[in-house]
Amino acid sequence: MIKTILSIPSSATELFGTGPQWDHWPFGPGYGNLNAALLKLAFVGLILGFICLFLRVLFGPKGIFRDKDLDREAAEMREKALKDLEEELASGEISELDYKFKKKRLL
């Protein structure tokens, strides 16, 4: 009985013609030809890309679970920094060119 149960995977391997390079795909030890290795990398890359996009949708700009207080605090800090920058320009502490670069960096 146990021999019959244990022979099922080997008979499935014979039936579908899969070789040893596909036994542990995509997380196997890496043996096989170049195409198998590239397909493994592409598969893992697709999974990681999907996870990144999923998290971006959930927590990115205008995301479902994004904390609105953090956006408000960031906007307030940006406004304060712009105000301070304009005061520095008006008092002559920085040049017009420095003002443009710093303003561009803030926005």
Image: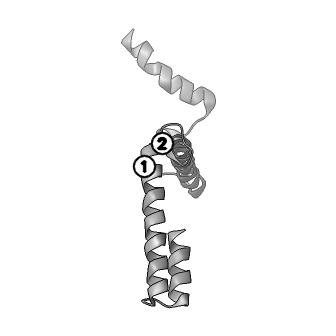
Q: Is residue 3 above or below residue 98?
A: above
For marks 1 and 2, give the one nearer the viewer: 1
The one nearer the camera, 5 or 87, is: 87
In the rendered structure, which amino acid carries the disc numbered 2?
Arg
In the rendered structure, which amino acid carries the disc numbered 1?
Leu
The one nearer the camera, 32 or 76, is: 76
Q: Quadrant of the N terminus?
A: top left
Where residue 86 sits in the image (x, y, percent)?
49, 78
Q: Which mark is residue 23?
A: none
Q: Which mark is residue 70?
A: 1
Q: Quadrant of the C terminus?
A: bottom right
Q: Which residue is mark 2?
A: 66
Q: Residues within 10 Å of mark 2 (few under 14, many from 20)?
A: some
Q: Are marks 1 and 2 in contact (CB under 8 Å)?
A: yes
Where residue 21 sits in the image (x, y, percent)?
51, 45
Where residue 52 sits in the image (x, y, percent)?
52, 48
The residue shown at (42%, 53%) is 73
